[in-house]
Amino acid sequence: MSFSQELYRDFAILIGQFLKEEFQVGGIVEISASDRDMVAVMRRYFAAQAELESLKAQLEAARQAAGDAIGVFYDPRQNAAHAAGLQRSHRLREEMASLMQRAEAWARAASGADKHDRSAAEAEPEE
């Protein structure tokens, strides 16, 4: 499993837990600003993913109904009727890639901070 796939799974779990805790404790959850930002990024990622999946299904249904070849239908220069949807799908993919890069950077930083905290705790002398 790639780092992105692991991160994707972990954030799906994080968002699920965040929402579960938020409703169980009456909306009061202590979460850092960084974590809130990351939850917002991942919510946007999942929203873009859902929109892209819906758009892909609509486009593929239209392609099959038209009986067009894949190369012709999915080329916005040759398919003016669906060019806006095709361009939107490309923008969504780019947005998702950008959001995942932000999430990966956040995860690396969080992982580095955790390692630093653990090593600092191990270095403290016991009394």
Image (cartoon, rainbow, N blue to C red):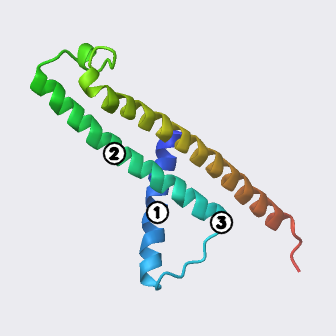
Front residue of 54 and 12? 54
- Give coordinates of residue 35: x percent, y percent: 61, 63
Type of amino acid under label 3: Ala
Which residue is the site of mark 3?
A: 33
State the image quarter where residue 72 is shown: top left
- In three-dimensional space, the C-alpha distance between marks 2 and 3, rounded to whole angstroms, equals 27 Å
Residue 37 in the image: above or below residue 50 = below
Residue 24 seen by the camera: yes
Tell whether 58 sits left or right of 41: left
Which residue is the site of mark 1?
A: 15
Type of amino acid under label 2: Glu
Please state, as top left, top right, bottom left or bottom right, where the C terminus lies in the image: bottom right
Which residue is the site of mark 2?
A: 51
- Give coordinates of residue 87: x percent, y percent: 38, 29
Within 10 angstroms of label 3, few (less than 14), some, or many (20 or more) residues?
Answer: few
Within 10 angstroms of label 1, few (less than 14), some, or many (20 or more) residues?
Answer: some
Q: Is mark 1 on a helix, strand or loop?
A: helix
